[in-house]
Image (tube, rainbow, N blue to C red):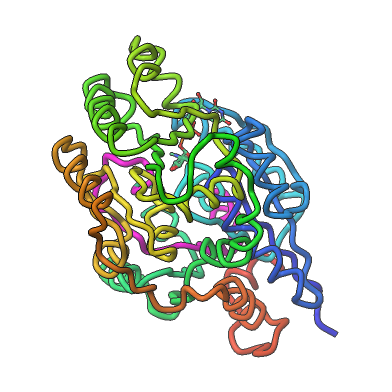
Amino acid sequence: MSRRLKFISVVGARPNFMKVAPLHRAFSRVESLTHRIVHTGQHYDANMSKVFFEDLELPKPDVYLGIGSGSHAEQTARVMVEFEKVLQSEKPDLVIVVGDVNSTVACSLTASKLLIPVAHVEAGLRSFDRTMPEEINRMVTDVLSDYLFVTEESGIVNLKHEGISDEKVFLVGDVMIDSLILYRQKARSSRIKELLHVAEGKYTLVTLHRPANVDDRDNLVKILSILGKVGTLGKIVFPIHPRTRKRIEEFGLKGDFDSITGLVLTEPLGYLDFLNLMMEAKIILTDSGGIQEETTYLNVPCVTMRENTERPATIEIGTNVLTGLDVEKVVALTSECYAGKWKESTVPALWDGKAAERIAGILAGSLGNGPTSGERTHPRHTALTN
Ligand code: UD1
């Protein structure tokens, strides 16, 4: 009889929860597999974390590390110290990390040093911009990973260029889109638009939190100018990230933001409320990574206020346009959108709601417990369990 496998998935920050939820569901369906969720506590406010567990029907994390905020080195190091203890007592067969946040790199590094195999979900994305902390996290995580699950073709090409063996790389689709497909219907019944007094198709949705945009006063002033102009086209809903709120206050710009016509500032929203707002927005202005993909799937116009993207498919075949913080360009594009002009989206291959299922099938097969049992036993896995 085969041994029971144990997987640990790591969540830390807001964009991780909607990626691990479908994985948890898929792993729960694999017989003789125990799946544990470790929450590093990188994000800890109820509206940045707890609400997502409720909305996405995720069980409470098995382990909560309570790391909190800090500099990159502090946060990463604290996660490593605490996660190492978990790995030493739990002795999992595999650690699964998602996305590109500090918890992702910290946990892949810790597992790797203990010779525990690592699976990276959302591997291979590259902005080629090392001023973004996420780019460093992606590169380091990918080089350490034993299984690299890729969302779009560009990921395959990038990993090949970096010399990562083809055998470790799997194009599986997008687990974040799995969540979107599963909860799209439920999100329709959210009452968030009533609460915020906005009407379907008549508002601009804004999210901004990248350090390059919000940690610099001049850039926040450009954002003020953009919102001031866009606010004349329709209402703006801006759920404000704690980093952004803090900077607006520190730079003495709170009064300026509060006086923008048509601007509805809210606390960060839960998954279902935000999905509802995203599905029914006229246009979204953002600097997020994931929203570029969600809007492409939903065929909702998206302007990404960054100079580059690690998700080129959203530009090439999706609804996304890159503008940086070019005030005139953002305003001109938003006006065009309100006038009814925007490109139509084609959904990238395999963004079909089944990415997590594919990942579970590959891992269960490879680690010796699933339908393709015995096909591929990982050498590092063998080293750990001997
Ligand atoms: C992190 C990720 C980023 C992701 C974003 C989504 C890294 C390097 N960055 O950025 O890739 O897009 O999450 O939100 O991992 N704070 C709170 N409450 C919280 C969490 C944060 O008040 O629950 C405040 C703190 O002041 C903290 C600041 O936000 O210092 C930044 O949090 P941090 O986790 O360092 O990075 P994010 O900007 O959220």
Q: Residue at x 16, y 38 (%)?
A: 326
Residue 141 higher or lower than 34, as above or below: above
What residue is drawn where x is 38% and y is 58%? Answer: 300
In this view, the residue in front, 295 or 93, is 295
Is 120 within the magenta? yes
Measured along the vertical axis of the image, is residue 283 above or below residue 376? above
Tell whether 131 sits left or right of 383.
left
Question: Residue 201, image x and y in percent?
Answer: 42, 51
Which of the 4 quarters of the picture holds residue 263?
top left
- Residue 104 painted magenta: no
Q: Position of residue 378 (x, y in %)?
A: 58, 76
Identify which residue is drawn at 27% across, 44% down: 130
Which residue appears at 75% of the width and 44% of the height?
63
Q: Which residues are magenta?
A: 110-135
Position of 46 relative to 134 (above/below):
above
Between 5 and 331, the residue placed more toward the observer is 331
Q: Is residue 386 visible?
A: no
